[in-house]
Every structure is written in structure tokens, then in C-alpha cells.
Image (spheres, rainbow, N blue to C red):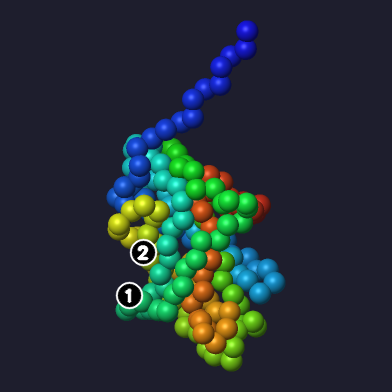
Amino acid sequence: MSASPSPPETAAICTIGQLQPWAGLTGAATALIATTYGFTNTSDQPCSRGGFATVQLLNSSGGELPTSDQPFRVSPGGSTLPLVLRRPGGRAYFQVFYPVDAEAPPVTCPTSAGLRFVPPGLPSSLTLTGAGAAITPYGWNSATPCGIVLVTALQASLPFPHPSPG
């Protein structure tokens, strides 16, 4: 007789007050830069969240810069299943890819001073400032010369191998 599989772990849906945004490592590939971002569960209760966050670039005054955020499915279908963020300190990861200036039209795009994230399914936002929020996304053509960001779905682990923090 074999043991039956254990049911999947479940938790209440995360609220905005349970989440803290953070920035991770940045890397480059041909024509794109990718930065890992995420949300940490800062509460004492597990919670879940899944899907695609939205991203808005901000200037130093908190005003909006031109931004076109688009879901980026790095695997067929792109997982949007809810993730359980164990308490406290559970993390959900996502990546933001953006074009570099070498592929852009002859323009100068602004560097963001902050990023406003709206976690999937929530009406409120979280703002990240500091070095990790300073990105300079260009566009694909003259119709959208600046501000293209491609956002992956939330993931339970780092999407690509990263060195351990020192």
C-alpha cells in the first residue's frame, strides 16, 4: 500500500501590508538587461500570491515616467499558480527585462529613481527606491522609444542560477 500524496500547501491571499519589495541581481544578455525583483512576506502568517506584477517607472519626484509593462512568459504558458510565502521572510521572485540603448533609436531615455509595483490581483502598490530601482529601459522602435519592460510571473525560486550573496 503506497502513501497518498500530501495535499498542496495553501494559505490566505497576501495583502499589500504583508509584502515588502526588494531588488536582486542584474545581468545582461543580447539586447536585454534583466533584474530580479521580488516580494518578501513580512507578516507572521503564510500567504499566497501568483501571476504577473505590474511595473511603473518613477522619476525622483515620484511622478510617472513613460512605461509599457508587458507580461513575459519565459516558459510555455508561464506559470501563474499561487505561491505560498512561508512566514516570515518567504519570498516570491520575478524578473524585469528591458532593452538596452544599443538597439534603441537615437534617443536618450530617462533612468528611473523608483519603481512602483502592483502585486498581481491587488489594487494597491508598493514603491521601491534606491540603486535597485534605477533602470533605463529603451524601446523597440520610434513608436515606443523608451520604457519597455517585460515582467515574468511570480516564481517560488530564483529563475536562473545566481551567486550567493557575500
State the residue position of label 1. 62
- Which of 59/31 is in front? 31
Question: Which of the marked residues, 2 or 1, is nearer the chain's N terminus?
Answer: 1
Image coords of residue 28 (percent x, y):
65, 69
Residue at 65%, 83% (x, y): give it: 102
Residue at 35%, 42% (x, y): give it: 13
Callout 2 touching callout 1 (CB < 8 Å): yes
Q: What is the three-letter code of the residue carrying label 2?
A: Thr
**Does 44 appear above or below 7?**
below
**Does 100 appear above or below 107?**
above
Numbered-mark total: 2
**Does 78 appear above or below 149?**
above
Q: Is residue 59 visible?
A: yes
Q: Is residue 81 left or right of residue 43?
A: right
Q: What is the three-letter code of the residue carrying label 1?
A: Gly
- Secondary structure type for disc 2: strand
